[in-house]
Amino acid sequence: MEIAVVTFDNMIQVIQDFVTVDQFEPPTLTAQGLTHVGAAIHKALDMLQIRKGEYKANGIAYYRPWVFMITDGEPQGEPEDVVLTAAQRIKDEENNKRVAFFAVGVLDANMERLKNIVVRTPVKLVGLNFSDMFVWLSRSTQAVSHSKMDEMVSLPPPGWGQV
């Protein structure tokens, strides 16, 4: 399993390119500025496309990648067409089974707006219960990694959030 971290406010920044879990050092993140959700989605999906290309070029099999977008707001400060094309891209990627895209709202996130952007129902994090969310994520990815390629795996309910 590999992890990359992209932050988004007034700027989109890759603060951690893909590394294996054992090499990952969780960064301290802060909320500030505007929320360029659409541009961040495009950046994350572009990074995944490049990474999957590297895997394919080297004959490495992989499971469908997961994207977790965690936000405390809603799209702000970018043209609406950027958000709309990002939402359509998520739909296309999900429908073609190229990615599993999860949205998590924290604090005052606009959950109704997130529903219009993503395919899967966004989950509202209870309080700031990130540790339970990451335990769930670890268990879920472990269940998937023990499955066969393209096998449907039932994920445990997200006890850390509200749908």
Image (spheres, grey):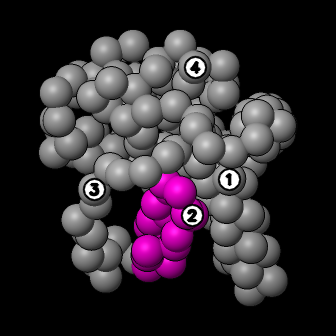
Which residue is the site of mark 2? 12
Residue 156 in sight here: no
Which residue is the site of mark 3? 30
Magenta extent: 1-19
Q: Is residue 14 magenta?
A: yes
Per the image, label 1 sits on a secondary structure element best described as: helix
Within 10 Å of disc 2 (Cα), the crowding (few <14, some 14-19, many 20+) is some
Per the image, label 2 sits on a secondary structure element best described as: strand
Sequence order check: which comes first, mark 2 or mark 3?
2
Which residue is the site of mark 4? 113
Residue 7 on image: x %, y %: 46, 60
Which residue is the site of mark 1? 39
Of the residues shown, which amino acid type is indicated by label 1?
Ala
In this view, the residue in front, 116 or 141, is: 116
Sequence order check: which comes first, mark 1 or mark 3?
3
Of the residues shown, which amino acid type is indicated by label 3?
Thr
Q: CA distance from mark 2 to mark 4?
A: 20 Å
Residue 86 on image: x %, y %: 75, 41
* Label number found at residue 147: none
Whether residue 27 sits left or right of residue 143 in the image: it is left
Within 10 Å of disc 4 (Cα), the crowding (few <14, some 14-19, many 20+) is few
